[in-house]
Image: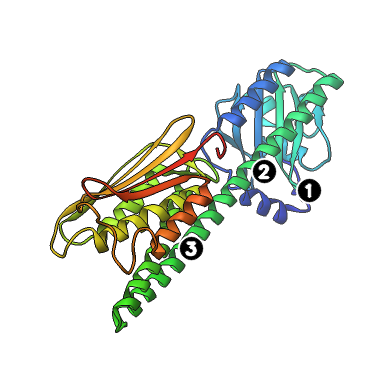
Amino acid sequence: MASTPDDQAARLSDLHRYNILDTAPERAFDDLVALVARLLDVPVALISLVDEGRQWFKARVGLDEGQTDLESSICSHAILVDGITEIGDTLSDPRTLDNPLCCGRSGQMRFYAGAPLVTPSGRKLGTLCVLDTVPRVLTELQREVLRVLADQVMSQLDLRAALATEEVLRSEIDHRVKNSLQTVSSFLRLYRARARHEETREILAAVNLRVMAVAELHAALYQSDTVGEVALDQYIGRMVALLQRQAPEGVRVESQCVARNASPQTASALAMIVSEFVANAYKHAFPVGGSGVVTVSLTSSQEEMVLICTDNGGAGSNTSPGDSASTGIGMRLMEASAEQLGGTMTAGPDETGYRLTLRVPLAERP
């Protein structure tokens, strides 16, 4: 059996940090061992990771066992030296002549070559190795192939570890952002409940709605399959559900949105317009105790994206002397959002209530 590496404690720490041991097969690694077996014309190829009391195979060709003890490990010898370890005849080499893989019941492996899997810190985790049932010698090209593919195995291990770390960090950030936004929202609701003036309560409610919209945007970004993009149908659907919870009794909000991805900036601007329109409809379109419907529609073609918001509160709804749809702060916010999108917005009464139409050219702003 091989001696223990001088850096064993640090080496094992690095190995365990990769969280690779005892994981399920993965195609990226399986493809590499299959490729090296074909290129070097050998019956057995392994990605072998040398643990404290065993060697475990992340991927293997030509060997049934998923791991062996260190007594049967040739790779435990290979990690003691730099570069490729090549044993042309295992029965003539003192490191392997009594190895069970070479002279025992488990096999008659007469040839071994292994390239170390070296971490960025210089620790050897194991090898990419090949074995044959007859003695042989690798050509220089075959040795280079083995070395290059070992580097590729290590690159895959590093990539796998980086992705796992990114997911952990992403989850932690998501948790912290959610908690922070929930805390802010709770304070806003508390201050709103204690406010004496109606104007103050309305302002705090509007600010809280913005905070909750940011929370929904964050959730949509976190759940998106495309980095840096938001699924508009899901995000607008979340916003509509949020607005519905704040709706006066008898008023409902309906939405129908195209399945399309957009940048967070685009999603946020659209959500601003939708929330301002719906909030204004709650305030002005429907009398106390009245019923009605606010609709939100988002469609898309190759040329443009179209957002239409309507209410059926009656002709001239969604306006008031102090906060009219044409001059109030809500309209100014919507106009600013439309300008941010590079779109054209029109708004005014129609035969059933109030209607807002936003057209965003996609050719100019993809």
Q: Earlier in the sequence, mark 1 or mark 3?
A: 1
Asked if the residues shown at circle 1 and circle 3 are in contact, with their CB atoms under 8 angstroms apart, the answer is no
What SS does tag 2 mark?
A: helix
Q: Report crowding for label 3: few under 14, some 14 to 19, many 20 or more residues within 10 A (C-alpha).
A: some
- Residue 226 in the image, given as x and y percentages of width and height: 52, 40
Q: CA distance from mark 2 to mark 3?
A: 28 Å
Mark 1 is on which residue type? Gly
In the rendered structure, are the residues bearing label 1 and label 2 in contact, judged by CB atoms less than 8 Å apart? no
Residue furthest to the right in view is 140
Q: Is residue 190 above or below residue 364?
A: below
Give the residue at mark 2: 158
Q: Amino acid at mark 2?
A: Asp
Q: Nearer the viewer, residue 237 or 57?
A: 237
In the rendered structure, which amino acid carries the disc numbered 3? Answer: Val
Residue 215: x and y in percent read: 43, 59
Left/right of residue 236 with respect to residue 152 in the rendered view: left
Mark toward the start of the polypeptide (2 vs 3): 2
Task: Determine whether, in the image, residue 118 is placed left or right of residue 157.
Answer: right
Which residue in the protein does label 3 denote?
Answer: 177
- Find the distance from the CA under tag 1 to the CA under tag 2: 13 Å
Q: Mark 1 or 2 closer to N-term?
A: 1
Which numbered marker is on residue 219?
none
Q: Position of residue 176 (x, y in %)?
A: 49, 64
Of circles 1 and 3, which is in front? 3
Relative height, residue 33 to residue 238 (above, below): above
Query: Of 81 and 95, which appears nearest the observer?
Result: 81
Inter-mark Cα distance, 1 to 3: 37 Å
Residue with the mark numbered 1: 122
